[in-house]
Amino acid sequence: MRRFPLYLALVLSIHLPGAYSQEAAANSGRVTLSNGRINVIAKNIPLRQLLEEIRQAAGFSLSTFPGAESEMISAVINDAPLEEALRIVLGRYDSVFLYSTGDSERAGLKNLWVYRKGQATGLEPASAEALADTKGLRAKLNDSDPAVRARAFEAMLARPGIEEHDSIGRAVRAERDDGLRATMIESVRSSGLELRPEFWGSLSADPSENVRMLVLDALEGTPQIRDFAALALTDPSPHVKQRAQEILEHLGAATASPKPGNVQ
């Protein structure tokens, strides 16, 4: 009677470690990667955990949504390309893949972002200008490519700092392309940014007729408009003169109109 419990204890002590070792071995071999092809065997494990194992095997950066560690997933994938395997695993989720060549000649997966279904809708990558610091944007404002200068200007305009505002004024005055300079002024107007009167004064003698016209339009309704319109009456462009005359006539009519309280 005493030998049976002892025998049972010996059996358990022999087999239990083996069972634990098999489970550990199965977990350690859940993800294998060779020559760009991956094998995955997972049954009801947290999504975050499985993605982390794939990340470690493939060597990319990973970002997941809060709660990914409690999302359970099962998958069996045999000898598939890495991207195909990830798309299978992430079939119920939104994901964004970033590929880059880095130091190699061929682009590879560098970053993976995972979101709940529908959360990535409308996401767009930020431009290099949006990510640049103010110093970097100022350098781009002097680029030989007008498209680069335009993007840098729009990025600068979206920033609230005084340093950026000063750079905006200088960029408009320094812009050598008449069409882009006019576009910059339109952007300033639509943004609601208030620049100093001397900024507008420096543009009242701009070589572009369109820019001089835009200055009048931008200042209409401000205390400075009367002086600028009066100056524009001597403008070499008949169109600018006409616009200035219209503004002054409108101001004169508004001044001459009696106040409602004075009507007899």
Image: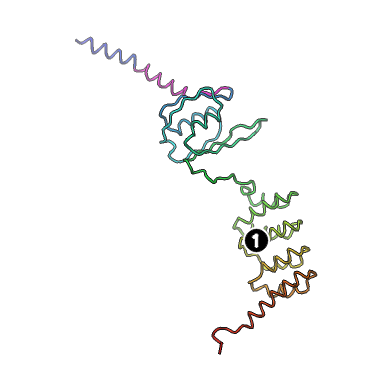
Residues in magenta? 16-34
Give the residue furthest to the bottom: 264
| Disc 1 target residue | 188
Q: Position of residue 213 (x, y in %)?
A: 72, 67
Q: What element carries label 1?
A: helix
Q: What residue type is labelled 1?
A: Val
- In the rendered image, which quarter is residue 159 located in? bottom right
- Magenta stretch: dominant secondary structure: helix
- In the rendered image, which quarter is residue 211 located in? bottom right
Q: Is residue 95 left or right of residue 43?
A: right
- In the rendered image, which quarter is residue 251 located in? bottom right
Query: Which image quadrant: the N terminus?
Result: top left
In this picture, is 237 found above or below 46?
below
Q: Position of residue 81 (x, y in %)?
A: 56, 26
Q: Position of residue 64 (x, y in %)?
A: 49, 38
Q: In this view, does 39 lie to the left or right of 183?
A: left
Give the residue furthest to the right: 236
Q: Residue at x 55, y 45 (%)?
A: 123
Q: Where is residue 61 in the image (x, y as percent from the top left)?
A: 55, 35
Q: Is residue 97 left or right of residue 252?
A: left
